[in-house]
Image: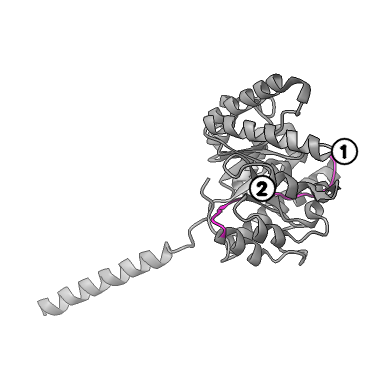
Amino acid sequence: MKKIFNFVVVALAAVALIGSVSCSSEPVKKQTGIQLYSARQAYSDIEATLAKVAESGYSAVETLGGPTCFGLEAADFKALCDKYGLRIASTHAVVPYNPADLEGTMEGWRKLFEGLKIMGAKYCVIPGMSFGSTLAEMEACCAFLNQVGVVAKEYGLMFGYHNHKGDFAQVEGQTILDYVIAHTDADKFFIELDVCKTNMGDVDPMHYLKTYGDRIKVLHAKDEGVLGTSGDIDFKEVFETFYANGAIDCFVEYELPFEIGEDAAANERNLAAMWQGIADCNKFLQESDFVRSCEY
């Protein structure tokens, strides 16, 4: 009888253990990031915005500007992000290129990098710029960007560029983005590829992922609406190729075009739709088995 009792106790303990394991075996949450421009209509209360970003399931942000962000000094903005468990992984910022004052331009970059170092960022990304209207101007600009990339490394940062539709135009028979990639160094300047048709025009993002895979270190996951809903982008192929190239980090950018106006009810509806879209983009990343956790 004692042996039977002991067997029953052990069996029940095993069942309880299995039950506890199965109850806690929820999928591990992936680390995901978002470009804060996605919530631009809510900037009036940046703390509430960061709280909603965290609530929507993101663990990192790509901010805008520097060395101050949203009127806050670097350390204060970092503290606010820390409060909501958000890592500041990157920024979109630019110091205007002034060939007549390269020293002053470089000093501007140093101030920006100092702020980003305080924030703990990994990347600094130019969100768009004019590289020049002639190949000679573009070559000089690229040479200077290489110099900026060297300084960025002194601050522990990777320095890159985010494409827009205009970057696929031609200057003296050369595609601008291709020329920039060819005339900057891989260890000093990378590309954050935005795959949305709005920013690619009629160019296939897969061409760039396959041709310049070693230069594309960050992905901007963006669609015409919530990720995966337009049908224009094969995100599975995009992500798998991106990972095969040895890269890992990406940021969501979601745009719901509206402006805050005087109609309070309309503002409330639009903001609710914006936050729903932001949350749905994270849900797409979390539920897509071809998307990996980022390593910010």
Q: Report the side of 9 relative to 239 (left or right).
A: left
Residue shown at 21% from the left, 72% from the top: 10
Specify the quadrant of the image occupied by residue 264: top right
Asked if residue 248 lies in the magenta stretch, the reply is yes
* Residue reaching furthest to the right: 262
Q: Helix or strand or loop: what does disc 2 sit on?
A: strand
User: Would you place residue 65 above or below residue 225 in this image?
Assistant: above
Residue shown at 67% from the left, 59% from the top: 211
Q: Is residue 130 visible?
A: no
Marks 2,1: beta carbons within 8 A: no
Which label is found at residue 197?
Answer: none
User: Would you place residue 77 above or below residue 26 in this image?
Assistant: above
Q: Report the side of 121 relative to 222 (left or right).
A: left
User: Main structural element of the magenta stretch: helix, strand or loop?
Assistant: loop
Label 1 CA crowd tier, 10 Å (few <14, some 14–19, many 20+): few
Residue 148: x and y in percent read 63, 31
Nearest to viewer (mark 2 / mark 1): 2
Residue shown at 58% from the left, 25% from the top: 114
Q: Helix or strand or loop: what does disc 1 sit on?
A: loop
User: Which of disc 1 and disc 2 is earlier in sequence?
Assistant: 2
What range of the chain is rendered magenta? 245-260
Frontmost residue, 140 versus 86: 140
| Residue carrying label 1 | 261
Asked if residue 142 lies in the magenta stretch, the reply is no
Frontmost residue, 140 versus 77: 140
Q: Is residue 143 visible?
A: yes
Give the alpha-carbon distance from disc 2 to disc 1, as whole Å. Answer: 33 Å
Residue 83: x and y in percent read 54, 35
Which label is found at residue 192?
Answer: 2
